[in-house]
Image (cartoon, rainbow, N blue to C red):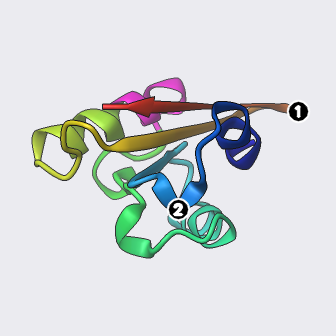
């Protein structure tokens, strides 16, 4: 889904500064980053602080990364979410 979203936007994953996936658990988060070819330090992980907060996990992780200064103006960020069954989605944004 992340690759398809980038392709649709005409953006290479190499241009994306940050990945913010659904914060289900660290193992899945690390696998997602690795699968997309992102460095571990490019993947925002807050599951240790907040736990799996379901639909709020991505906005909470985005807020944490903005507040602590990791995400800067002009950077591209991809948000990737999954849900029950066959539900998933991604959003690419320039912050």
In the rendered image, the vertical position of residue 38 relative to residue 74, given as above or below: below
Where does label 1 land, which residue?
86
Cα distance between the residues tagged 2 and 1:
27 Å
Between discs 2 and 1, the one toward the N terminus = 2
Magenta part, dominant SS: helix
Label 2 element class: helix
Mark 2 vs mark 1, foreground winner is 2
Where does label 2 land, which residue?
14
Does 30 sit left or right of 77 as displayed?
A: right
User: At 44% from the left edge and 35% from the top edge, which residue is drawn?
Assistant: 57
Mark 1 neighbour class, 10 Å CA radius: few under 14, some 14 to 19, many 20 or more: few
Task: Give the position of the N terminus as an image quadrant.
Answer: top right
Task: Give the position of the C terminus as an image quadrant.
Answer: top left
Comparing 20 with 12, the one in front is: 12
The image shows residue 36 at horizontal and vertical percentages of 65, 64
**Which segment did they paint magenta?**
53-59
The image shows residue 83 at horizontal and vertical percentages of 72, 32
Q: Is residue 55 magenta?
A: yes
């Amino acid at each position: 889904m992340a690759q398809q979203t980038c392709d649709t936007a005409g953006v290479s994953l190499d241009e994306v500064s940050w990945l913010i996936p659904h914060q289900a658990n660290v193992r899945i988060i690390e696998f997602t980053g690795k699968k997309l070819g992102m460095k571990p330090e490019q993947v925002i992980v807050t599951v240790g602080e907040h736990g799996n907060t379901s639909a709020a996990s991505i906005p909470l992780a985005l807020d944490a990364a903005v507040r602590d200064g990791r995400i800067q103006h002009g950077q591209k960020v991809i948000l990737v979410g999954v849900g029950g069954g066959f539900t998933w989605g991604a959003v690419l944004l320039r912050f």
